[in-house]
Amino acid sequence: MVRAVREFRLAMDCFHNDSTTITLQGAYPSATGGRRRGKASLGIALGHNKDHRPDLKQLLWILTISAERAVPVAYRTEDGNTNDSPTHRESWDTLRSLTSRSDFFCLADSKLCSSDNLHYIDGQGGRFLTVLPRNRKEDRLFRDYVQTHELPWEEVLRRPNPRDLDGPPDVWRMVESPIPAGEGFRLVWLGSSLMAEQDRESREGRMAAALLSLEKLETRLRSPKTKLRTREAVVRAAEKAVGSSAGRWVRWEITEEMVETFRQEHRGRPGQATRYRRTQKVRYHVVWHPEEEANLYDARSDGMFPLLTDDRKMSRRELLVRYHFQPRLEKRHEQLKTVYEVAPVWLKKVERIEALLFVYFLALLVEALIEREVRRGMEGKGLESLPLYPEGRPCPAPTTDKILEAFDRVGAHDLVGRGKVLRTFGPELTTPQKELLQLAGVPEDSYSG
């Protein structure tokens, strides 16, 4: 990695870190984390599976990229049941060893936001930016504060609506938090108009689903064939209908109705002297209504979330721009799992799986460097796109897959006679292929050779 940084002159002043899980098929009874060939090995185990497969064992894949075009610069693999939060300290130490400095900027998700991690990075002279978790008291206090106060929001970014090009733009606002962070670091709140709309739609959708489920439950309770005959059973059914996500905005209660029924004491055709027996049964009903107060409370802070940093000089817009780069790292995880299809892994020994994952890291690195060189070459020549799509359609951001696809039919040929090579015909490159080589900084004669 040090050689790659030196050869390609990678910018090493800002990094993004995140983790994902490599889901494995099989039991792997011997992969318990013991020592193999004198070195500690990984433990393949059950854990919080980010592929939504809690039934399968896994390994934790931790990747760090440079903010310059999302080039991978470091990775490591941990046991499958490893908690994300403690891994950030070792990741930061790795970056300090790689860069021989400590004042670089490090961005990560809310798993970084623990007092131990933040004080360690800040104490070593580092800088960080992370999302404050929703369960922190500062989050609750701020959402209480905005119910009765108007804040001096500053518009820092306005961009086209990615969901609807003809729709309203996505407007981002920021404000310094009036509620200080418990650790004393800088706390900044963001608000997005598009995220506010998404929060509103999500809340209304969950409310509508809960009300529909309660309506269906009431229909079941009114049926004489219902099996929900006890209050406890009805309560459990109502809780299941509302769910944990919509319980805040939908109130419900169980009511009772005494139902009288009459039945002949004896069999036979009823007459004037027939005696009837009256019985009373309890029938349960569910009554519901939207909780308007909670709905209005949450609507006041729709689309808002906090960022925590120890950098007090960087402007709010700069913080937002750096934060918006974080999805590029998630794209690398997506490439690992979809484009390269890291799983399933057809290996039994955990040490071989470790070696294979290292090869995947190298593949991600090479891919990112190819894209970086070609796109930098395009910027240097003022090219907005290249004709790499079918029918020669313009491609504004060439990927490694499209770049290599342009060379699929390039080949060299040998003319053989009497067991000897009489003549070699080298590759005949087209003009677009030559342009790609030039943009990537690859000499044409070196490629032909």
Image (tube, grey):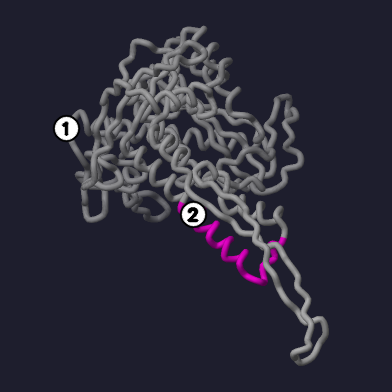
The total of numbered circles placed on residues is 2
Q: Callout 1: helix, strand or loop?
A: loop
| Crowd rating for badge 2 (residues with CA inside 10 Å; few <14, some 14–19, many 20+) | some
- Residue 18 position, x and y percent, is 50, 30
Q: Is residue 340 left or right of residue 389?
A: right
Of badges 2 and 1, the one in the foreground is 2
Q: Callout 2: helix, strand or loop?
A: helix
Residue positioned 49% across, 44% down in the render:
249
**What residue is disc 2 on?**
209
Q: Is residue 71 left or right of residue 138?
A: left
Q: Nearer the viewer, residue 30 or 125?
A: 125
Q: Is residue 238 left or right of residue 406?
A: right
- Residue 431 position, x and y percent, is 19, 44
Amino acid identity at mark 2: Ala
- Residue 265 position, x and y percent, is 81, 81
Marking on residue 382:
1
Vertical comparison of 205 with 364: above or below: below
The part of the chain drawn in magenta is: 208-229
Residue 408 at least partly seen: yes
